[in-house]
Amino acid sequence: MRPVVFALLSFLAAPALAQDPVVLVQSTTSTQNSGLYGYILPIASEALGLDIRVVAVGTGQALGNAGRCDGDMLIVHARTAEEAFVAAGFGTVRYDLMYNDFVLVGPQSDPAGVAGAASATEALARIARARVPFASRGDDSGTHQKELSLWQGIADVTAASGSWYRETGSGMGATLNVAVGMRAYTLTDRATWLAFENRGDLVILNQGDPALFNQYGVIPIDPVRCPNVNADGATAFTDWLLNDGQAVIAAFEANGQQLFFPNASD
Amino acid sequence: MPEHNAADVIAFHPKRRPDLPGLRITNLHLTRRGAALLKGVDLALSPAGITALLGPNGAGKSLLLRVIAGLIAPDRGTVQIPRAMQGRIGLVLQRPVLLRRSVRANLRHALALARVPRRDRGDRITELLALGHLEGLADRPARHLSGGEQQRLSIIRALAANPLLLMLDEPTAHLDPQATHAIEALVERIATEGTKVILVTHDIGQVQRLADEVAFLHQGRCHERAEKAAFLSTPESAAARAYLNGKLLL
Amino acid sequence: MPTFSDSILSALGLILSADGDLLEIVALSLRVSLTAVMLATVIGLPLGAALAVYRFPGRGALVVLVNALMGLPPVVVGLVVYLTFSASGPLGVLGFLYTPAAMIVAQTVLVTPIIAALSRSTLGDLLGEYDETLRVLGANRLDVIGTLLWDGRFSLATALLAGLGRALAEVGAVMLVGGNIDHVTRVMTTAIALETSRGALPLALGLGIVLLLITLVLNAVVLGLRGRLEAHAHA
């Protein structure tokens, strides 16, 4: 009986027994699934003497969690929401961290003919006209917000929800699985797509429009608002990301391609 | 004078209690689900020896035992049990209900429930096993015993707490003659040692062999109580007469 | 189908190579779920026994409630436990969130009703058999509970296995309260969810097969032990 009790207590005491100080980052599934954190975290943790942990959820959930003080910092890609977060006093400052882009993927047969479209909005307009299936994140994520901004003035997707416009309410990976399963078009960030292994019949059909630019930001959570945060750790990691970490981010590749482009301003 | 075998000397406590009055049942009524099962049982039992409860199926004999044991509360009427006897009542059911343990463990469990001090339990178990002639089976799982052996165990288990009253509900109904004989010897032994016994039975031969007095129940009432020989030769009530003659009683 | 054979090969590959990450994930799954089942037993077994043996007003409603709670959705439990251990929640000071401790708490909540309801049912049946005999022998309610628990211990093992199966299989609760953090709170089910979201379906299925095998082995061991012990049960 005693070994059992001891094992139990050591679990429950685990938080107090951690080696290095912990820094908890609320971040998104796209950065997680691409493998970025698997690459940069060991390097950063070693360099800073910190135990850096990432909880990867949708942007909306990440912001919500951070707003409840469940984390030390944020790395997401929804600029408007990020700025609102800081303005509301939850975060100290928002910094540009890195960027990549979104791409439009769809079935190889391209029934809506988006391959030739000159802009992303034109591509979406063709999809709306053809009423072919489009899978949306539908979860208030950065990707979702970018997607909605592109639909503005093109189509009323709220009205179309359930017909050709399918809202999965899920992360990027899950949405891609759905898109593959129903041979639908979808908007995805390039990093997730390049790391995704279940592409089925889908290929990149439209890309390059500057409107598809995808900016990531990093925000330490305000220690005044949330007294429990590891402010020193968050500051240390943020500083690293914006300086030494930039080269590390640039060095990360999948299938021989660089996925994230550091752009922290000096 | 035959030598007493060591196993024959059983330290049963208490011995006879001739000072205790017999059980008195007055106007006992019990209705369940709209059916009147006991319709005013009046019965005074002799204080010692074996009382046989006789009667056709549905007469209320098993129910009466349960009321006496305190398992069921009657709707009306009383069961007067001598104070010394209260809480010192044993009941053996038709089909023995034994724990999923060894014979010995069953007895130990009963002794624990009876709050017999731990240091006395070992000796007591030895006594009881000898009484029931189950010494060789002490460590066998109780449920692996034969029907007769299980019933013997059931009886000695009921004796664990030294009851002043032991009630048995058709204990040999499902047993062969040999097992029946063993049970009857045991019951007789127990009564001789001073425990009052109430025995529900259908077996007239068993009544003849064991009983001192007979109470005859029919349709929820006691029709007659008499000394055994008198009852068997000249029953007073018509129902008892018909029953003893093997006629169907409705 | 190519995916299924890929998955089986993937599963075999993982097992035979004794992949370090896999072992870590399996170990954590077992630690979290086994601990949760132990705690759930400590709470649920006496509760189930009491429900079986005691009669009180409202007992029927309580039985219905406990049975219904067997169907608690894991994701809902996860949400409630998350909000409880959130830094801005009532128990935030404990620092359980995003650690195995919170996962154990969530799974304990999920498993306790299962243990309570199934033990109530098992012990209730046993009580029906033993009740009169025990009462005549002078047993009070606590005596009865003790007798039922010991005599029913083999049937109760099945209730524990049901609870363990539920704990090992759920993903909604541990994902929310654990955060699926690599090397910290990643268990088999959250790893499967992650690989699925990466589109690595054969690997995800392979992990699923490994999880199934573990559950199979656990069940076989417990039921095998039960058979042997039951045959020898004398005490």
Image (tube, coloured by chain):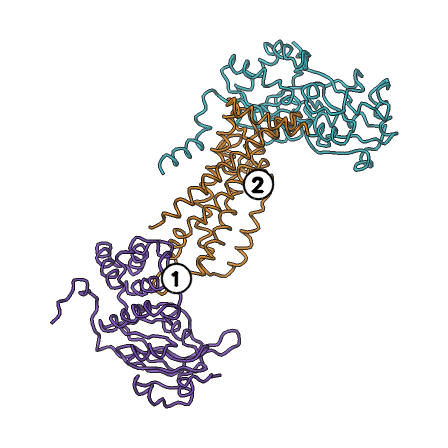
Chain colours: A cyan, B purple, C orange
Residue A238 coordinates in the image, percent (x, y) = 59, 16
Q: Which residue is mark 1?
A: B97
* Element marked by disc 1: loop
Q: Is residue A203 above or below residue B154?
A: above
- Location of residue B107 in the rendering, given as x and y in whole percent from the top left corner: 30, 58
Q: Residue drawn at (16%, 62%), measured in percent from left and top?
A: B6
Residue type, mark 1 in image: Val
* Label 1 environment density (alpha carbons within 10 Å; few <14, some 14–19, many ≥20): many
Tell me the quadrant of the picture where the N terminus of chain C can be found. top right
Question: What residue is shown with label 2?
Answer: C77
Between C120 and A217, the residue placed more toward the observer is C120
Q: Quadrant of residue B127?
A: bottom left
Q: Crowding near pointer 2: few (<14 within 10 Å), some, many (20+)?
A: many
Q: Chain of mark 1?
A: B
**Of residues B93 and A91, the one drawn nearer to the viewer in this rendering:** B93
Secondary structure state at the residue bearing disc 2: helix
Coordinates of residue A223 in the picture (x, y in percent): 55, 24
Q: Quadrant of residue B40?
A: bottom left
Label 1 close to label 2 by CB (< 8 Å): no
Left/right placement of residue C105 relative to residue B22 reads right
Q: Tell me if A129 is positioned left or right of A259 in this view.
A: right
